[in-house]
Image (cartoon, helix red, strand yellow):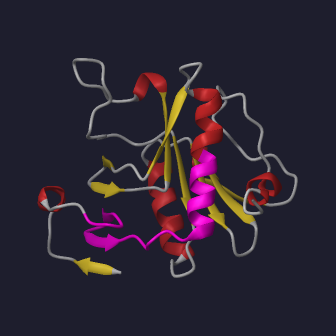
Amino acid sequence: MVLTKSLTLEQFLQRPETKPASEFFQGEVVQKPMPQGEHSTLQGELCDRINQIAKSQQIAYAFPELRCVFGGNAIVPDVTVFRWGRIPRQPSGRVANRFELHPDWAIEILSPEQSQTKVLEKLLYCSEHGTEIGWLIDPEVDSILTVAAGQRVQILNGDRLLPILSEIPLSLTAEQVFGWLSL
């Protein structure tokens, strides 16, 4: 749902937060859809699986619904993964509130009312600005569209291995990811 087209990025960032989150992308303020069961399950499982391995070894950290401001836009992927050394921190060492950089890995989970093209456009934008891997998870068709360096796009399903940041010793297939929906 497009909320407005007449704000600058700075004006957008001064506005109160919305629930669900709003994004500022290509001059438009768009509110993300309210997550539903499949979306929430996949988001939680992805963060848990990635962090079980990557956090303990200080390789990377997966954040749910984290606003990333870069290249003149403010987007909120469903899951963002940052390599440990790229996580913005306060002088005390605590995690910063504002992330003004692109994620290393951006994951979007398609909701029924979302446009696959619009979500893919955000992942391609991330790739243009340095994001190494993007995933667009489509629960309706049990497939994961991936965006890799050079904006190489693939659709993966079944037992094919999904691309993951090379430092994270985790192997996942689309079949495993969608298997999480059968609790």
Specify whether 22 is left or right of 109.
Answer: left
Percent across and percent down for residue 11 are: 11, 61
The residue most toward the front is: 183
Q: Position of residue 158 (x, y in %)?
A: 86, 59
Q: Quadrant of the N terminus?
A: bottom left
**Vertical order, 41 against 117 (above or below):** above
Quadrant in which residue 137 is drawn: bottom right
- Residue 10, relative to residue 58: is it above or below? below
- x, y percentage for residue 86? 41, 27
Write the start and end of the magenta stretch as one range: 18-46
Relative to 56, 130 lies left or right: left
Q: Residue at x 73, y 34 (%)?
A: 170
Magenta-colored stretch includes residue 21: yes
Q: Camera-side residue: 107 or 120?
A: 107
Judge whether 31 appears above or below 167 on screen.
below
Seen from the viewer's position, the closer of residues 183 and 20 is: 183
Residue 148 in view in this figure? no
Decide whether residue 107 is among the magenta residues.
no
Residue drawn at the location 58% of the way across and 21% of the way down: 56
**Which image quarter: residue 154?**
bottom right
> Would residue 23 be visible to someone looking at this image?
yes
Q: Residue at x 26, y 54 (%)?
A: 72
Where is residue 163 shown, x and y percent of the image? Answer: 71, 43
Q: Nearer the viewer, residue 171 or 71?
A: 171
**Front-most of 25 and 128?**
25
**Mark count:** 0
Given the current orientation, which residue lies at the most extreme right position? 159
Left or right of residue 94, residue 120 in this image: right
Left or right: 160 in relation to 150: right
